[in-house]
Image (cartoon, rainbow, N blue to C red):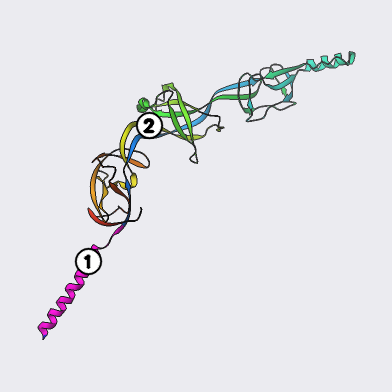
Amino acid sequence: MIQRVMILLLLITSCKQAATEDATTDIQTPVSVINISRGPMQEYIELNATSTFLLKSFIKANATGYLQSTNIHLGQLVHRGQLLFTVKTKEAVSIGNAVNALDSSFKFSGTNSIKASVDGYITSLDHQPGDYVQDGEQLATISNNFVFLMNMPYELHNAVIIHHTVDLILPGGEKITGTISAAMPTVDSVAQTQSIIITMDGNKTIPENLVVKVNIPTVSKTDVITLPKSAVLADETQTEFWVMKLMNDSTAIKVPVKKGIETKDKIEIISPVFSDNDKILVTGNYGLEDTAKVKIINP
């Protein structure tokens, strides 16, 4: 009797273990998959550039006297030949009063006009109407030739090509296009960086001293296989890389890969050569065994 009870207990235990193993085997990890992409790819290095005016023209008084009027304000765009100030000397005031006393129909002003010598923005105003100014005294500053100056490590000089366009990324993420126009003929003796002049395409108004990011392409390829970064997994030392490839509707296997260049969101796959029909896990792939049961949740 006791022997029969023991056999029955063993049978029950075995059934429970088999059920547990079946349940474990049936566990499927929800995943989403993606096909490879093919096309051109560039690897960039990100540097900073600062907006600045390369040229500053100083507007000066052309006579000693009183500033009669100002026709400008800070930040205003002015053009060459535009009237900026008028100055009236003490002598002109005296002569004008005497002439007008003799003949009121004779209009004598005795004012000197001061005009802009270049196009640009008014970036400083040093006097206001009524001020007494000396001949040659600075009245305002016109800044022009607006550019971005990028300090580039000299070892990257081969990556910068004059007249090529680059992306300028403003704070906030807005992207504008610039053109590399020149390289300064000197290198900073300490930092060993060279100043690169980037002109902005278009008429967008940018304040001076704004720091933007510049993407400089260092490697360009025309036809490569790429995957999203989330599809490529790595070990702790970042020396081995792999993807999880779908073998059938419910099984994924580990496939070691060799990486090439990469951007912020995608990686070039040098080997193995995947086909356009291969499906690679892009989510749910982290922590899976070399062979894993999966459940596809995307179409």
Residue 286 percent location from the top left of the image: 30, 53
What label does residue 22 carry, if any?
1
Q: Does residue 185 appear left or right of residue 115 in this picture? A: left
Disc 1 to disc 2, C-alpha distance: 53 Å
What label does residue 217 carry, if any?
2
Q: Please tell me whether residue 34 is drawn above or below residue 93 in the rendered image.
A: below
In what quadrant of the picture does the N terminus appear? Answer: bottom left
Q: Please tell me whether residue 103 is drawn above or below residue 291 in the rendered image.
A: above
- Label 2: state its secondary structure: strand
Residue 113 percent location from the top left of the image: 71, 18
Residue 47 percent location from the top left of the image: 42, 33
Q: Residue at x 29, y 48 (%)?
A: 279
What label does residue 267 carry, if any?
none
Q: Residue 138 lies in what quarter of the image?
A: top right
Magenta extent? 2-29
Residue 15 shown in magenta: yes
- Label 1: state its secondary structure: helix
